Amino acid sequence: MRRKKRTKLDRRHQAFTRFMIIVAVMVIWMLGVSARLVHLQVTQSGWLREKALDIRQDIKQTKLLRGSILDRNGRTLAMSVRARTLYADATEIEDVEGTAAAVAKALKIDVRQIAEALRKGKEGGKKFVPLARKLDDEIVTRVNRELDRAEARKPDLPSFKGLHWREDQRRSYPYQTLASQTIGFSDSSDSGKAGIEQSLDKVLRSSIVEKVQVRDRLGRVIKEEEVEKEGEPGDVVLTIDANFQYFAEQALEKGVTDSGARSGMLIAIKPKTGEVLALANYPNYDPNTVTEANSKFVLNNSVQSVYSPGSVFKLVTYASAVDKGLLSADSNIDAGNGTVTVGGRTFKDKNGGGPISAVDAMAKSSNVCAIKTALSVGKEDFYSMTRKMGFGSKTGIELPGEVSGIIRSPERWSGDSLASQAIGYEMGVTALQMAVSFATIGNNGVRVSPNIVKEVRTTNTEPPTKKARDQERVVSAETASAMRELLKKVVISGTGKRAKLDGYSVAGKTGTAWKFNPETKSVDSSKYISSFIGMAPADEPEIVVAVVIDEPRNGGRDGGQVAAPIFRDVTQYLLEQLGVREDQPKSVGSPQAVAKAEPTPEKNSPTASSSVDKGAKARKEEPKKSSEKPKEVQAPKSKDKPGDGRPRVVEKLTASDRAVPFHFRKRPDLREIET
């Protein structure tokens, strides 16, 4: 009996022990689960929430199209178009070599390049490895077709594991080389790197837009929200006219190639408003293929390079004397025996000496007369006029990289510095500064800051923003009028006779300056900067055109022979296109005069198109002009090939082919040069 009772007690004890063990295990398990839940819901809640959102939704960033650049008439000079970038999520790639081979075949590029990018991305755990940027729709469709893999089972294209598309944009320049140094270009990240693209990058810059996509368990998009992070990009309207720019570039190219020069610059500006109608540099480049361009052709020499102006700077010399009342158009200047010695250095004229009128001194570009005029003014007043004309300071034009030039203060001058500067040496100026100085005389002595941006359009609802132009009186209206009288004689009977226009009077000045040779540290009498700057009509100027040719090699190389004909062709065209009233009769037999006498042709009758004659040689008589306006510039098609008539690059250029800052180490002998 006792044994049975004890057995029952043992069994109860064992059952209780087992029960307590189970309870303990359950308690420990529950405590463990609770601790884990607390850890997950409190400590790791943020991480889990992000992981869940990462599975359920995608956040994609896209850019609005970068703003456009337009000419004054609304023609698009630069625009952005939709494109796509192929990228890889390296964490999803299993077969690097196989993926690289497939992508390389589809894109027709080097497989080693793709494989290396994928390997580095996989090692770094990168989810964005760009493989091909800014592809158009035609290429995207072909790549999707060649990368189609049925086993991928992806909700997006291409149907290849680990490969995806990202929305992108590509910059397009429809007119190719037209105004390339002015417009500039943008890089692969759509940031402006030159020209207007750089200086107004904040206006043109693409806005970032976020798209939040919510997906179901099969990866299908069930909801999409768009959040704009920045304002919309704006458009920039330039003052240049595409037709004017095209004609100017063609004329400049012809002048550079015919004279065998290294490069050339041309600026057309309205003196009353400061608007730049054309700004050309040759050689130029195509911003659509900027990676293939020579870096020195990207430089806008008109505002970023300086040169010694030579005799065109006599405008400042005589203006300083006229404004002080020391000289007038009727005054005589005694050239003596045709020489003048300043600071132990003798300057000579090739035209001899004796008394000469101020207008003839300007017309013949007498160095002696200019130097004597500057000496009568004095170095302080001469320097003051130089600075008031804008030399030694930036003009403020809306282009990047503008330089101030090289103008030294009088305390740094040597004994003959005033004489050298009177004829355009011992200084460095930009072509734009010279154009503005002539525009000041053309605007009755008031200097207007040049501008190449007409307006900025920020949104469709806001009015366009325009910048107020700075104006400053430099010389009196009487001084400006007297200076125009001096400059008219240069074209009528002086060194600028090849600048004569048909139906319009011209006031201008030639310049031919020896270049500084950085290797010999002295001026080189075999290398020139030849220029002509003028305004028309002479009494009420509506346009100022500056032409600067760097190192002409063929035929006559002075400004009157090289630059003046280019001025003539471009200025005649611009005045007629602007509808400026003629102030002189047309020459007998000219197409314009005949057109006035003859009946207007019928609407559908054939007419001749006006253009720059590329095969014509230099002629002494005036070239014939067409009575019809040139056809509007058309954007070249993408399949255009070299030889289609677009400006070509001079083949003989070298790495040093650019106007360099001019300063004296050794003094030149200025005896026989027409400056």
Image: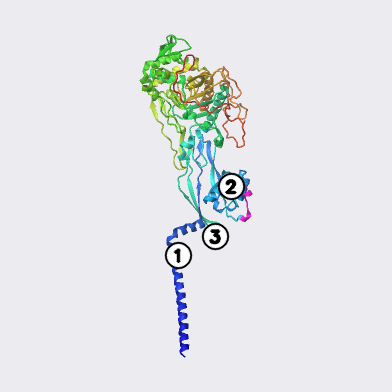
Residue 254: which quarter of the image? top right
| Closer to the eye: label 3 or 2 | 2
Q: Is 373 placed above or below 38 here?
A: above
Q: Which mark is first along the chain, 2 or 1?
A: 1
Q: Name the residue under label 1.
A: 36
The magenta stretch spans residue 174:
no
Left or right: residue 144 versus residue 335 is right
The three-letter code of the residue at mark 3 reads Arg
Q: Badge 2: few (under 14), some or many (20 or more) residues near its Cα, within 10 Å?
A: many
Q: Badge 1: few (under 14), some or many (20 or more) residues near its Cα, within 10 Å?
A: few
The three-letter code of the residue at mark 1 reads Arg
Q: Mark 2 points at which residue?
A: 115
Q: Is 54 placed above or below 287 here?
A: below
**Residue furthest front as drawn:** 3
Asked whether disc 1 touches disc 2, contact meaning CB atoms under 8 Å apart, the reply is no
Asked whether disc 3 touches disc 2, contact meaning CB atoms under 8 Å apart, the reply is no
The residue segment tinted magenta is: 141-151
Image x and y of residue 498, in percent: 53, 18
Q: Name the residue under label 3.
A: 217
Secondary structure under tag 3 reads: loop
Residue 326 - label: none
Q: Is 121 placed above or below 585 here?
A: below
The three-letter code of the residue at mark 2 reads Ala
Q: Which of 58 and 127 is in front in this view?
A: 127
Q: Which mark is first along the chain, 3 or 1?
A: 1
Image x and y of residue 639, in percent: 62, 36
Secondary structure under tag 2 reads: helix
Residue 71 appears in the figure: no
